[in-house]
Amino acid sequence: MDEPIRALAALVRERQPCVVLTGAGVSTESGIPDFRSPTGIWAEYDPMEYATIDAFRRDPVKVWEFYALRFEVLVSAEPNAGHLALAELERRGLVQAVVTQNIDGLHERAGSRDVVEVHGSIRTASCLECGEQVPLDAVVAALRAAPAPSCSRCGAILKPDVVMFGEMLPVDAIERATELARRAGLLLAVGSTLEVYPVAGLPEETVSAGGELAIVNRGSTPFDGLASIRIAGGAGETLAALAEELA
Ligand code: NAD
């Protein structure tokens, strides 16, 4: 493990700015299951029934039954060694920003300041009818009293402000992420299968603009061949070792 970590640390030092792209694998060590692993969420729930905007419009209460279970886990999770290491590297000026597909808010809670949430977050939920937006604690309280939170203004069922399949990504976030990837000397992708577009297009943005790609992920990704370094270790221990190597 030491040699790949030393090589990754050298890349981080030499190929600034370093932008980090994270996926669900960075949060599994916080107890939040990912989607595509054998123990992931899609092994149990069909995404077409629970994670598309059409499914939500068809039967929002059913979709909330799924989200209520996820929210319980998400709100009690704590940042792990990987989130903390990335925040530390940002403080030391070695990581410019974190682009994340995660909706759990754990990077921010770990102390990362420049976090681009390309798939939204559970921090708020919104009413698709009247636009009312409510904070997470109100959603959690509503879920204790009813199967789905409803809008206090118009009564419609609220939707969590996370990007569901079939929805557009927040324009500002994906534009900023693309710009960061294009200008990055190094894009470090951690804990993502890199299968969900447009985020999966970011490694190519970096490499075609002359930057390098490094991947830390337990499973394989379609971009492994494009990476200068690939480490198949756990995100927490790998990022903690990287921060130590760079200290
Ligand atoms: P994914 O489930 O497709 O892939 C996760 C990858 O991480 C897998 O390749 C797996 O092998 C790897 N992995 C799992 N645990 C790891 C660990 N401890 N160390 C290193 N690698 C590990 O996830 P993705 O690529 O992020 O998929 C994208 C979608 O998943 C996004 O839309 C995101 O919003 C959503 N998602 C978010 C959360 C969260 O917020 N924590 C959780 C589940 C899914």
Image (cartoon, rainbow, N blue to C red):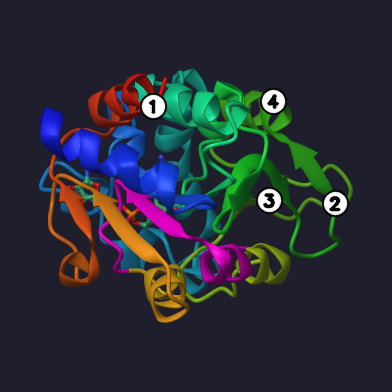
- The answer to which of marks 3 and 2 sits earlier in the sequence is 2
Check residue 132 in the rendering and tell me which mark sits there, or answer none.
Answer: 2
Mark in the foreground, 1 or 2: 1
- The answer to which of marks 1 and 2 sits earlier in the sequence is 2
Residue at image location 38% in from the left, 25% down from the top = 243
Which amino acid does the dot numbered 2 rest on? Glu
Decide: is 69 above or below 209: above
Which amino acid does the dot numbered 3 rest on? Leu
Q: Name the residue under label 4.
A: 137
- The answer to which of marks 2 and 4 sits earlier in the sequence is 2
Query: What distance separates the C-alpha of mark 1 from that of mark 3?
Result: 44 Å
Quarter holding the C terminus is top left
Q: Name the residue under label 3.
A: 158
Q: Is residue 95 visible?
A: yes
Residue at image location 28% in from the left, 37% down from the top = 33
Q: Name the residue under label 1.
A: 246
Residue segment shown in magenta: 177-195
Query: What distance separates the C-alpha of mark 1 from that of mark 2?
Result: 45 Å
Residue at image location 16% in from the left, 39% down from the top = 4
Which amino acid does the dot numbered 1 rest on? Leu
Is there a contact, CB below 8 Å, between mark 1 and mark 3?
Answer: no
Query: What distance separates the C-alpha of mark 3 from that of mark 2?
Result: 9 Å
Query: What distance separates the C-alpha of mark 4 from that of mark 3?
Result: 14 Å
Classify residue 57 by image quadrant.
Answer: bottom right
- Tag 3 secondary structure: loop
Query: What distance separates the C-alpha of mark 1 from that of mark 4?
Result: 38 Å
Cβ of mark 2 under 8 A from ligand 1 = no
